[in-house]
Amino acid sequence: MSNIIKQLEQEQMKQDVPSFRPGDTVEVKVWVVEGSKKRLQAFEGVVIAIRNRGLHSAFTVRKISNGEGVERVFQTHSPVVDSISVKRRGAVRKAKTVLPA
């Protein structure tokens, strides 16, 4: 039974995901639906956490917008995520970058 589940998950996983780590600056392009229109929206920021769970993998990106910190969690293999591009590599020592409140 678990072999069937693994096979189905493997088929649904995206193959074009770049390798990135916490501390890297990435640009995530996400499909946004507004009424009947569908468009791409870019979200650029620093990766502060990565959760590797196969098909259920996720990562958190933080950016400063108008003086406010904005964090957004993206599912790595979601069809809503169109593309992920690494803009700059960063060097951090922790897997989960905790920022002060």
Image (cartoon, rainbow, N blue to C red):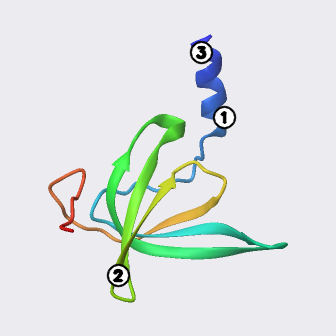
Place of residue 14 in the rendered image (x, y in percent of width and height, measured from the top left): 60, 47
Question: Which residue is situated farthest in the top direction here?
Answer: 1
Place of residue 31 in the rendered image (x, y in percent of width and height, measured from the top left): 67, 67
Mark sitting earlier along the chain (3/2): 3
Q: Which mark is residue 3?
A: 3
Label 3 neighbourhood size at 10 Å, few (<14), some (14-19), many (20+)? few
Say which quarter of the image contains residue 9: top right
- Which label lies toward us, 2 or 1? 2
Question: Which residue is situated farthest in the bottom direction here?
Answer: 66
- The quadrant of the picture occupied by the C terminus is bottom left
Q: What residue is at 52 percent from the left and 51 percent from the top?
A: 75
Three-letter residue code for mark 3: Asn
Q: What residue is at 61 percent from the left and 67 percent from the top?
A: 30
> Are the residues at dot 2 and dot 1 in contact (C-beta closer than 8 Å)?
no
Place of residue 79 in the rendered image (x, y in percent of width and height, measured from the top left): 66, 53
Query: Marks 2 and 1, how far apart in space?
Result: 39 Å
> SS of the residue at dot 2?
strand
Label 2 neighbourhood size at 10 Å, few (<14), some (14-19), many (20+)? few
Three-letter residue code for mark 2: Glu
Say which quarter of the image contains residue 21: bottom left
Is 52 displayed left or right of 82 in the figure? left
Q: What residue is at 33 percent from the left and 87 percent from the top?
A: 67
Residue linked to disc 2: 68
> SS of the residue at dot 1?
helix
Label 1 neighbourhood size at 10 Å, few (<14), some (14-19), many (20+)? few
Q: Which mark is residue 11?
A: 1
- The quadrant of the picture occupied by the N terminus is top right
> Are the residues at dot 1 and dot 3 in contact (C-beta closer than 8 Å)?
no
Q: Relative to 87, does residue 15 appear above or below in the rendering?
A: above
